[in-house]
Image (cartoon, rainbow, N blue to C red):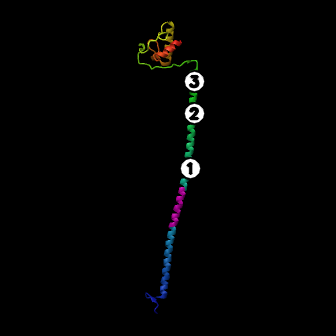
């Protein structure tokens, strides 16, 4: 009976080896089940990430679509606004042309001078002396013209724009001469 190992018989060693193999298989099966569960959780998490990415891409596509619609609408609004402003400007210019070319204002002045700060009773001191009818406003026709000019300037600009002598101080001597010679 020399068939003993570690004080055990061959059948006992085979029985213990079979038990160890069964325990080893159970332990390896448990480890495999644990890793399979862990892999399943990772796969589920990856699937959730893919779903979240898909939702984000859908939201981004919807946002981009809304932004494009908003830009198109803003573009149409801007074009309509500019078109309306141009139409109004054309209308205003046509209205100005009608007013300017009407018989009420046959001639526009070449120059308009600025008003100087002098009192009503002081004559203009910087106006050059002119000869002829434009330079002297004397006589009955000149007096009537002077009063007419005084009333027109007062009506348009107010009473402070006419000097004490009844002459318009807002007009330059050249315009006053041209205005007076045309009367």
In space, the residues marked 3 and 1 are separated at their CA atoms by 52 Å
Identified at 58% across, 31% down, the residue is: 87
- Mark 3 — residue? 97
Q: Position of residue 139 (x, y in %)?
A: 49, 6
Note whether 7 is above or below 152 in the view shown.
below
Could you tell which of marks 3 and 2 lies nearer the N-terminus? Answer: 2
Q: Is residue 151 visible?
A: no
Magenta segment, which residues? Answer: 38-53
Of helix, strand and loop, which one carries label 1?
A: helix
- Mark 2 — residue? 84
Q: Nearer the viewer, residue 11 or 180?
A: 180
Instruction: For marks 3 and 2, give the one nearer the viewer.
Output: 3
Q: Is residue 94 visible?
A: yes
Q: Nearer the viewer, residue 38 or 86?
A: 86
Could you tell which of marks 3 and 1 lies nearer the N-terminus? Answer: 1
In space, the residues marked 3 and 2 are separated at their CA atoms by 20 Å
Extreme residue in the bottom direction: 1
Q: Are marks 2 and 1 in contact (CB under 8 Å)?
A: no
Of helix, strand and loop, which one carries label 2?
A: helix
Of helix, strand and loop, which one carries label 3?
A: helix
Note whether 47 is above or below 117 in the view shown.
below
The numbered mark at residue 62 is 1
């Amino acid at each position: 009976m020399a068939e003993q190992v570690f004080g055990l018989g061959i059948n006992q060693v085979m029985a213990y080896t079979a038990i160890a193999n069964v325990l080893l298989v159970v332990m390896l099966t448990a480890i495999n089940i644990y890793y399979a569960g862990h892999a399943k959780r990772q796969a589920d998490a990856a699937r959730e990430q893919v779903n979240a990415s898909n939702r984000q891409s859908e939201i981004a596509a919807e946002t981009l679509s809304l932004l494009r619609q908003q830009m198109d609408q803003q573009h149409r609004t801007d074009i309509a606004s500019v078109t309306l402003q141009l139409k109004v400007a054309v209308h205003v210019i046509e209205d100005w042309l009608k007013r300017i070319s009407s018989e009420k204002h046959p001639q526009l002045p070449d120059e308009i001078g600025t008003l100087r700060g002098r009192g009503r009773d002081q004559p203009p001191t910087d106006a050059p002396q002119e000869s002829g009818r434009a330079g002297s406003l004397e006589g009955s026709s000149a007096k009537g013209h002077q009063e007419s000019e005084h009333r027109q300037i007062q009506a348009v600009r107010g009473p402070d724009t006419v000097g004490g002598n009844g002459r318009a101080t807002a007009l330059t001597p050249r315009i006053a001469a041209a205005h007076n010679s045309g009367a």
